Image: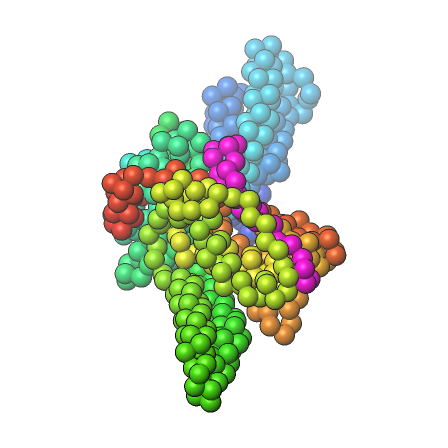
Amino acid sequence: MKPNWLSLQNVVPSTSRRNRWLAYSVAFAAPTGIMLVMWASENHTFMTPLYPFFTLAIMSSALLGGLYPGLLSYGLSVFYTDFLILQPHYSLSIADPKERLRFAAFAVVGIAVCALVANLRKLHEQYRREAELIKVSFDAIIVWRLHGVIESWNLGAEQLYGYSESEASGRVTHDLLKSIHPKPWPQIEPEFRVNRRWEGEIHHRTKDGREVVVWARKRLVRGDDGIERVLEVNRDLTERKQTEQALIRAEKLSAAGRLAATLAHEVNNPLEAAISAIYLASTDPPKSAEMLAVADQELRRVAHMVHQTLHQTLGFYRENPIPAQVSLPAVIDDVLKLYDAKLQQRGISVLRRYKRGTCKERADGCFLINGSELRQIVSNLLANGIDALRDHGTLHIRVSRINGHGPRISLTIADNGCGIRTENLKRIFEPFFTTKQAVGTGLGLWVTQELVRKHNGTIKVRSRKDKGTVFRITFPATAPAAEGKLESIRSSNNKSVVGY
């Protein structure tokens, strides 16, 4: 079922030149024909029954052509009645007082009808143009009732989902598109009814079984018939999401390369020490036990670094969509271990302002999140901070809890390094923008921002040239859950959430 205004395009004609000539022709012919019928009748002075016919002629002219054809029909009607039909002819005065009153009423009503119908026609023209724009829009535009039955389905929806309007009309949206919202629709609907709008990412299934990701905007509107309907506008994000995932994978490869380079550099020193110790043990038997102990110590150090780097690298690649309780301080400590040697070599101090430990130990910053993605966020920001620092600089890291509009976890990473130029500050989150021409990919901060937004967080930056830079990230805080509750959350996330 289409909204009523969509059918007006079958009632209101277009404003082409041919139709305008037709409108003026009708505006002239209609009152003239009524006058000729009047003069052909025997009782041509009996005018009162013909007033409605002249009014109908004015309405038809205004509806067909607009204001000016309506005014032409109105002027001819007034001229014919006053100068050619009513007594005395060709005079501005009418002899019969009653007829004079009727004529005055007709003159007032006629001009009002002409203006009213012309404005109605103009409004209908606007509705028709809007209907045409909606019909050919590239976005999928769907109108459905609150119980999910589709009433309107535009061409953009046909192209995106593969269903024609006749196939979609009357179907329930969640049955047709297999919608998966960020959380089940029954949980979203109460808030939607109050705010009367909602927007966010939704996963849909097309007619041929493909999964598409759309950015949906839903608005609850009440029609003239008193029925509440949902106007939904969906923009296809599938290609954009695929491109983003490809860029994120590229950044992960780059991060793995940087870790490998760091590992190769750090492993080289203990390996050389172990080789030297083994050589000395073979050439100086009395000291062989001591030298072999040194070699064993250095090789254990190498094994620890390899294990730690492998743990971090695998953390970047584990695509586990199920969130879990993660300790932000523990993640920070793990990532910092990778850079211990570099920090010591350059004399960089790290000031930590958070309670360390695991979530079971009530550490600061425990909340529900994808652990590998949080690790990547922290790694990108810490690597940037270390790169920006001069030797003997200071890196400040703070984790805190904010109780504003809902509790949030805040991570602040600040350095007193080289800072960011003002002209570059506005571009640092753009993909492929980098000031590290030799080693940078320009994807690190962009990926960081995308991952933060994915988890409904915010990221802000302040910087001054040669003074330092401060990054601040906040996430919605989730209280540490009991094991049973956490398992129920995981189970619900594993299911296909059906909702319209």
Residue that protrudes farthest toward the right in the picture = 466
x then y, percent, for residue 222: 41, 30
Name the residue rendered at 52%, 32% in the picture: 404
Residue at image point 59% right, 69% down? 440
Q: Nearer the viewer, residue 160 or 227?
A: 160
- Residue 323 at least partly seen: yes
Q: Position of residue 480 (x, y in %)?
A: 36, 39
Main secondary structure along the magenta-highlighted residues: strand
Quarter of the image for the C terminus: give it.
Answer: top left
Q: How many marks?
A: 0
Judge whether residue 410 is colored magenta: yes
Q: Depth check: give the residue in front, 404 or 360.
A: 360
Q: Which residues are magenta?
A: 389-412
Where is residue 304 drawn, in percent x and y?
42, 67
**Is residue 465 highlighted in magenta?**
no
What residue is at 63 percent from the left and 13 percent from the top?
A: 95
Question: Which corner quadrant holds the N terminus?
Answer: top left
Image height of 242 relative to 484, above or below: below
**Residue 345 to residue 460: above or below:** below
> Does any portion of residue 278 appear in the rendered image?
no
Report the residue that reaches farthest toward the bottom: 283
From this view, report whether residue 16 is shown above or below residue 218: below
Say if 397 sits above or below 229 in the image. below
